[in-house]
Image (cartoon, helix red, strand yellow):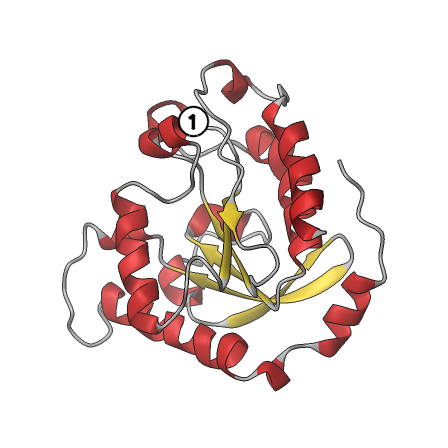
Amino acid sequence: MKEQCLEIVRQKCSGCKGCELAAKRHNVVFGEGNANTAKIVLIGEAPGEIEDETGRPFVGRSGQLLDEFLANAGISREEDLYITSTVKCRPPENRVPTDVEKEACRKFLNAQIDIIKPRAIVLCGATALKSFMELDKKTTISKIRGQWMTINVDGVDYPAMTIFHPSYLLRNHSLAENAPRTLMARDLREIKNTYLNDVQRFNDVVMENVENREIAFV
């Protein structure tokens, strides 16, 4: 049922011309993962060049590094995660998507979350985080990453954590204590231990809320 619902949204997204990004895309990068087993929705920023060519999220250098970190933490990309991004088309020169572009894609992102009904949401990088909450200029990813917070999607509260975007880690190779790569590994272990290892920690109230509400197919 979840796969069929996602396919309906995917088809609508594939024909979207809600912002200027549609004019130059090669492929819409909707998202991927096993909708029936995914317990976490991981949200990135936007497709890059390789993602635009293949139609798959996180398959370039950043995605390959993310896969390494996931594997080391014992998180299965194929079974545990549904991976998507704040916008589904590549911004020119991989620039940060604008608020207008993010807003045009928001109905698709919300529908994905509504359908998957995740135990938690992982916000990968600053753009994903800023799509759900306003930050003052003093608040950086380094200060907020690794902390559980609550975000609301269509009236449902979800536990969420922000992690470094793997593109940032490509420029930071140190494995010293409290270096970005070490913190990333720590955050992913925390996510696994909290929402993948112990099913009793799943928020039953969230599950009940999302099971009983209708999903609007954008």
Q: Position of residue 126 (x, y in %)?
A: 43, 50
Q: Residue furthest top?
A: 23
Specify the quadrant that holds the C terminus: top right
Q: Residue at x 65, y 29 (%)?
A: 11
Q: Is residue 173 left or right of residue 124?
A: left
Q: Nearer the viewer, residue 17 or 14?
A: 14
**Label 1: few (<14), some (14–19) or many (≥20) C-alpha neighbours in 10 Å:** many
Label 1 residue SS:
loop
Residue at (34% x, 64% y) in the render: 70
Q: Residue at x 42, y 70 (%)?
A: 146
**Residue holding disc 1:** 91
Compared with 99, 18 (above or below) is: above
Estimate the x, y position of residue 102 in percent, counting from the top left. 57, 35
Name the spot of residue 214 as percent of width and height, x first.
Answer: 85, 51
Q: Residue at x 49, y 59 (%)?
A: 81
Q: Residue 36 versus residue 29: which sits nearer the camera? A: 36
- In this view of the protein, which residue sits in the foreground, 19 or 5? 5
Give the quarter of the image for residue 67: bottom left
Q: Quadrant of residue 111?
A: top right
- Label 1 sits on what residue type? Pro
Residue 73 in which image quadrant: bottom left
Above or below residue 212? Residue 95 is above
208 to the left or right of 185: right
Q: How many marks?
A: 1
Foreground residue, 79 or 198? 79
